[in-house]
Image: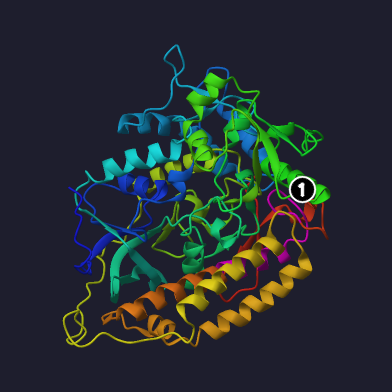
C-alpha cells in the first residue's frame, strides 16, 4: 500500500525508480500508469489538496456519441490551435480519448448520465458536437478524488506533502534526481527518472483562475536544467471569471454559456455579437471582445445572464457555481453576475514528444507543465484534462536505464541530528519578497495580458533580468546552487520560510522572463497571443517558438 511517512521524518534518499513532482490529475494518473514493480516517490508541494485540476469545472472532451467522430474532434482541435497544433499529438489524443474514458469509469469515475442512462455530454466553445463529459460542475474535483483513492492503493509508492523541489539533478547530460526542501532540511534524492507534473503558470498574472502554486515553477526548473520549452507566449485567458471586489477570480465555466447563458454589456447589448459563434466563439476572441467593450464603456466587468437556462437545469448542472456565487451575495438565477477575463491555461510549457519525454534524458513532463504540441496557439475547451490522461498513459512504456539510481550516503556531520541549524538570511524581508511577487503579477497582467504592449513588455523584460541578477547574490540561493549531492543541510525556521519565498520569486521571475521573451519574439497575433503592434497572423510565424538555456530563442516546425 502507499506509504504516508510522517513529515518529521526525512525522505529516504533512495534509490528510487521514478520521482513524480505534483499531485494533480497529471501526477496522480502518471503514478497509476507507471509499470508495476517500480519504487515511486510522489512529491507534493502543497500540504492541502489544492490543484488546478481540482478547480476544473467544465469537463473532459472525448467522442462518445454515434454522430460524433475522432476526425471531427481532431478538426475542432486544429481549428482552435490556429495553425500550430502538431497533428501527431492531436491524433494521439482524439484516438486514445474514448479508451481513457473507459479507464476512468473502471477506476470509479461516475460521469453524469442522461435520462436514458447514457453518458451525458455538453457543448463547449469551438466544439462542433456535444462531447464534453462532466460530473455536474466539479469534474476536476471528482477526477482528482478518484485518482487519489486509487494511487493510495498502489504498492511501493511514497506520497509526501509539503515538499519543495528546489533544483533538478543533472549529471553527465541526464536528469537523475532532485534537490528538495524537506521540512527544515535541504538535500538531494536520486532516481532513474523524474516526471514533472507541476501545473501551469496562470498565477504569474494578477487576474487568474489558478491557485498560487500554478506559477511556472516546473518550466523554470526544467529550463534551468537544460530542457527546451516551447510556445510560452500562448496563454489562454478565460472570458468569464467572477469580477467582484474582495472576491477571488472564481471561474464561471464555459459550460454555462454552452447551456444557454449570454454575455451582455451595461446597456444590455452583446459584446460578442460580431464574432462567429458569438458567446461560444474561441476563448481568445471572446476575451478580447470583452476587454475592448469594458475599455470603451469605462467598466471593469461584463454581465453574464443565466436566465436563458431553464432554472431546474441550472440547479442540476451548476450547483457549485450557484453556491459559490451565493456565498458572495450574488443570485445568478435572479440577475446577471459580473465577470471579466482572467489568465486560465498556459498552452506552452516544457517541450515533450509523444512519449512525454523532454530533450533532457531522464526528464519527462505531463499535464499543463508540458507542451506536447496538442494545443497549438489556443487550447480547445476541455482537451486539457484528457491530455493529462493520454500522456500519462504513454508512460506505461517508460524507458528507464538498466542501472539503478545512484545511492546517496550523507557525509558525517550533515545528518539532521548533528549540529545547529544553518542561518542563511535573505537581504529582503519576507514582507518585501511577498510585495515584490505581487508587483510582478500586476506588471505581467498590464503588459502581457489579453492585449499586449510590446514597449511595456520590453521594459518589463529588462527589469526582470536586473531583479534576477540581484537575486543570484542571495546566500540561500547560492547554497542551493553549490550544495554537494551527498550533503544535507538543516535550516532554522526563519531561514526556511525566507528561502521558500526567495524560490517563489526566483521561479516566478524566471518563468515571467521566458514568457516575455517569447511574446516579444513572435511578431504577430495568433490564438492566445495578441499584440497591438502586430495584430494579424503572419504565414512565416506558423511555427513553434523554442527556448533553451545557453541558446538564442528560435523556432521549430509544426508537425503536419
Task: Out of 60 and 204, give the one closest to the viewer.
Answer: 204
Which quadrant would residue 205 be assigned to in this image? Answer: bottom right
Location of residue 166 by image quarter: bottom left
Q: Is residue 352 left or right of residue 536?
A: left
Q: Is residue 514 magenta?
A: yes
Q: Which residues are magenta?
A: 510-530
Q: Which residue is nearer to you in this view: 353 or 150? A: 150
The image shows residue 552 at horizontal and vertical percentages of: 65, 73
The furthest residue to the top: 116
Taking 433 as reference, is 99 left or right?
left
Tell me the residue at 69%/54% (across/down).
Answer: 543
Q: Point out residue 516 in the picture as x, y percentages from the top left corner.
A: 66, 66
Instruction: Say which element carries label 1.
Output: helix
Residue 172 at least partly seen: no
Where, quadrant-wise, is the C terminus in this rendering? top right
Judging from the image, the colouring scheme is rainbow
The residue drawn where x is 65% and y is 29% is 261
In the rendered image, is residue 370 in sight? Answer: yes
- The residue carrying pointer 1 sits among few (fewer than 14), some (14 to 19) or many (20 or more) residues within 10 Å by Cα, namely some
- Residue identified by numbered label 1: 294
Residue drawn at x 32%, y 83% as measured from the top left = 484
Q: Position of residue 4 (x, y in %)?
A: 20, 55
191 on left or right of 217: left
Amino acid at each position: 500500500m502507499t506509504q504516508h511517512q510522517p513529515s518529521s521524518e526525512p525522505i529516504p534518499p533512495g534509490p528510487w525508480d521514478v520521482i513524480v513532482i505534483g499531485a494533480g490529475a497529471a501526477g496522480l494518473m502518471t503514478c497509476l500508469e507507471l509499470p508495476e514493480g517500480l519504487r515511486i516517490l510522489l512529491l507534493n508541494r502543497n500540504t492541502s489538496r489544492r490543484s488546478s485540476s481540482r478547480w476544473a469545472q467544465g469537463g473532459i472532451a472525448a467522442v462518445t456519441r454515434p454522430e460524433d467522430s475522432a476526425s471531427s474532434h481532431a478538426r475542432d482541435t486544429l481549428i482552435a490551435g490556429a495553425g500550430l497544433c502538431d497533428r501527431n499529438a492531436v491524433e494521439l489524443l482524439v484516438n486514445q480519448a474514448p479508451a481513457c474514458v473507459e479507464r476512468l469509469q473502471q477506476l470509479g469515475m461516475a460521469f453524469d448520465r442522461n435520462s436514458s442512462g447514457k453518458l451525458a455530454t455538453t457543448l463547449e466553445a469551438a466544439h462542433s458536437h456535444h462531447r464534453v463529459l462532466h460530473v455536474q460542475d466539479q469534474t476536476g474535483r471528482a477526477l482528482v478524488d478518484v485518482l487519489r483513492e486509487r494511487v493510495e492503493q498502489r504498492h511501493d509508492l511514497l506520497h509526501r506533502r509539503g515538499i519543495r523541489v528546489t533544483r533538478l539533478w543533472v549529471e553527465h547530460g541526464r536528469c537523475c534526481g532532485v534537490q528538495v526542501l524537506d521540512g527544515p532540511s535541504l538535500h538531494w534524492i536520486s532516481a532513474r527518472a523524474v516526471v514533472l507534473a507541476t501545473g501551469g503558470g496562470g498565477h504569474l498574472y494578477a487576474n487568474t483562475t489558478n491557485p498560487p502554486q500554478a506559477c511556472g515553477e516546473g518550466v523554470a526548473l526544467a529550463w534551468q536544467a537544460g530542457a527546451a520549452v516551447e510556445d510560452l507566449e500562448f496563454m489562454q485567458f478565460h472570458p468569464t471569471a467572477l469580477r467582484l471586489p474582495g472576491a477571488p477570480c472564481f471561474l464561471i465555466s464555459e459550460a454555462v454559456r454552452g447551456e444557454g447563458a449570454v454575455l451582455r454589456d451595461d446597456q444590455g447589448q452583446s459584446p460578442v455579437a460580431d464574432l462567429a459563434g458569438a458567446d461560444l466563439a474561441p476563448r481568445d476572441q471572446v476575451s478580447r471582445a470583452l476587454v475592448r467593450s469594458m475599455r470603451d464603456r469605462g467598466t471593469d466587468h461584463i454581465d453574464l445572464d443565466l436566465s436563458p437556462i431553464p432554472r431546474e437545469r441550472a440547479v442540476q448542472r451548476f450547483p457549485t457555481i450557484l453556491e459559490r456565487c451565493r456565498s458572495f451575495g450574488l443570485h445568478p438565477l435572479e440577475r446577471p453576475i459580473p465577470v471579466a477575463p482572467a489568465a486560465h491555461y498556459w498552452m506552452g510549457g516544457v517541450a515533450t514528444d509523444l512519449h512525454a519525454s523532454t530533450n533532457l534524458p531522464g526528464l519527462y513532463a505531463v499535464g499543463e507543465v508540458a507542451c506536447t504540441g496538442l494545443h497549438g496557439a489556443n487550447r480547445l475547451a476541455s482537451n486539457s484534462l484528457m491530455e493529462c490522461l493520454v500522456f500519462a498513459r504513454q508512460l506505461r512504456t517508460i524507458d528507464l536505464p538498466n542501472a539503478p539510481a545512484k545511492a546517496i550516503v550523507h557525509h558525517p556531520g550533515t545528518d539532521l541530528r548533528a549540529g545547529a541549524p544553518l542561518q542563511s538570511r535573505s537581504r529582503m524581508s519576507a514582507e518585501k519578497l511577498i510585495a515584490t511577487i505581487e508587483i510582478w503579477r500586476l506588471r505581467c497582467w498590464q503588459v502581457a495580458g489579453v492585449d499586449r504592449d510590446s514597449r511595456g513588455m520590453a521594459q518589463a523584460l529588462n527589469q526582470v533580468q536586473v531583479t534576477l541578477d540581484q537575486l543570484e547574490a542571495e546566500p540561500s540561493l547560492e547554497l542551493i546552487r553549490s550544495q554537494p549531492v551527498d550533503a544535507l543541510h538543516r535550516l532554522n525556521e526563519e531561514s526556511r520560510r525566507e528561502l521558500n519565498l526567495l524560490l517563489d520569486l526566483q521561479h516566478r521571475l524566471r518563468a515571467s522572463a521566458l514568457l516575455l521573451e517569447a511574446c516579444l519574439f513572435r511578431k504577430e497575433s495568433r490564438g492566445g497571443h495578441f499584440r497591438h503592434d502586430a495584430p494579424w497572423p503572419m504565414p512565416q510565424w506558423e511555427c513553434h517558438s523554442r527556448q533553451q538555456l545557453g541558446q538564442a530563442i528560435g523556432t521549430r516546425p509544426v508537425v503536419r
